Amino acid sequence: MRQWFRIVFPRNYSDRQNRAGFLFVLPALLFFGSVFLLPLAQSIRYSFYKIAPGGAKEFVGLRLYEKVLTDPGFWTAVKNTLQLLLFSVPTTVVLALAVALGLNRIVSLRWRNVWAAMYFLPFATSLVAAALVWQWIYDPVYGFLNHALSFVGIPPQKWLQSLSQVLPAIAAVSVWVRIGFDTMIFLAALQSIPEQYYEAARIDGANAFHQLRHITLPLLNPQIIMVCILELIFNFKIFDQVYATTQGGPAGASQTVIMLLYDTAFKFFRFGDASVMAVFVFVTLLVVTLLQWRLFRKPVEY
Amino acid sequence: MNPIAPSTEPSPGAALASRDVYVRWLIALAVACGAIMIFFPFFWMAITSLKTAPEIQRVPLQIAPDHWLNLANYFEVFKRERFMRYLLNSAVVASVAAVSSLVVSSLAGFGFAKYHFPGRDAFFLAVVGIMMVPFQSVVVPLYVWINDLGLLDTYAGIVAPDLVSVFGVFLMRQAIETIPDDYIDAARIDGCSELRIFFSVILPSVKPAMATLLIIKFMWSWNEFFWPMVVISSPEMKVVTMGLMSFTNMYFIEYNLLTAAAVISILPILLIFITLQRWVVQAVVMSGLKG
């Protein structure tokens, strides 16, 4: 408290310096407070109120939680989101790791940069544009994918219009968008591993697989965990790709949690119900992030 | 590889070397094939944007367009929709977001990196914690407040939650931490005020980080879709990602127009991105996060 008093009423030069420092961070703090913390508190408050489209509020306790959490539509959306995660997260991480290992083995720096740039390119495009271009590739009649598959004798598939294929098809778009980002993180980590480790292992007679299993992967462990968590969060919040292509269809087969939240809040203006979902999303991702911290804290064993 | 390695067994060594070259080529080939597959949707988008409507419905499918310089779709995009206006809207919003983010983040980065005011570490931890709050969890109250302020359907409304990013504070703090304290002290002895130090000592030494933040923030704002969908309802305030959606509202999607619009929307970002890619990669890797 006394320290704060001296910040507000500085007594000497050092106090004035600290006051300047605090004033420098103040705009950012105020912004984050008013755009994240206050609305988060408000979201939690809203989740206990029934809110009429006009703005009239009525306290209903946990009734909205009961309503949303017993709604089969909500759990379908959760199930679809988890299924999307299951398709896209492992695929992205494994492919990105493979690409990073490959890129790391390319000797010519110029070519390595060219290929890396190509993998990274989708990261710069909007998810909407990416999803729409993929929708065209997936087109059941005129799309390129069915055309290409016809050469290996596979009959035309319905992709985004099929109940069973829509989730993998959307997941593939996410993989395409995210693979470059993850590759860059892995590649940077790979390049920081000292070459001596591998030389020592080779002298001890370790083959390429041994080196990967006992040097590269253990040393990459923190990055692998981090990327997995980032991908989980990114894919859990999936909205743009689904909204731009299927809008949750066909027959709700690609309805996701954030899609449902958006529709509930801004199509039907049921702010209370939407806030329950907002709290659900926040708590879920919080648990995932805290789990990440615990995993990170554990020292990596070699 | 190792000059002092014993060369008692030359023949297995030589065999190993030739196999290494073979493997290296295989890896390079696999990497290249993957890269080309990743690039393919861009190629297909560009190709489709040069075709006419009957051409894209031709069976069997034909890869090359009839005329490589058929830009009719591009003209049609601007005629059919107010696409110029959408581009302008996106440019305004993304520029404001990038510049404001730069100013606030570099100030905050300086404060966190070089001062010892009480509670500094707790505040920084709180900023880190902000990353755990998904934007979708705060969107309803934000919408209500923007509505109360009468900012629905305005630039101010679109840009409001986008003015600062945690990523920016991280990036600038990390960059400013590398500046030696001696420089700052020397400036103080010369009688510089703290703000003057910020402008004439700090900012000139972190130009690469500033450029990176500017680009990345511009890119993210330009590609933003969720929040604009929430606050924008009138056609003339749409941003470019929403503009793309207006080509999908028909029963049959005219993909030749849609891909032309997509090319227009992606191209500015892609060009900036390719030219400055090294910096972007560095920043992304350093922070490993998206705000």
Image (cartoon, coloured by chain):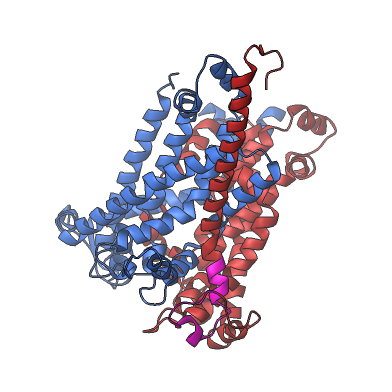
Q: Residue at x 55, y 40 (%)?
A: A102
Classify residue B278 as left or right of residue A240: right
Quadrant of image for the N terminus of chain B: top right
Front residue of B131 and A160: A160
Magenta residue check for B200: no
With respect to residue A112, does B39 lie above or below?
below
State the residue lying farthest toward the right: B190
Apparent colour of chain B: red
Position of residue A77 measured from the top left corner of the image (x, y, whole percent): 25, 58
Q: Residue at x 34, y 34 (%)?
A: A291
Front residue of A86 and A235: A86
Classify residue B9 as left or right of residue B128: right
Q: Quadrant of residue B93?
A: bottom right
Front residue of A61 and B136: B136
Position of residue A89 measured from the top left corner of the image (x, y, whole percent): 38, 47
Q: Quadrant of residue B229?
A: bottom left
Q: Residue at x 45, y 18 (%)?
A: A302
Viewer can see residue B279 = no
With respect to residue B267, does B261 lie above or below?
below
Front residue of B41 and B119: B41
Position of residue A182 measured from the top left corner of the image (x, y, whole percent): 50, 44
State the residue lying farthest toward the front: B11
Apparent colour of chain A: blue
Viewer can see residue A50 = yes
Position of residue B225 measured from the top left corner of the image (x, y, whole percent): 47, 65
Magenta residue check for B46: yes
The residue stretch that appears in magenta: B43-63
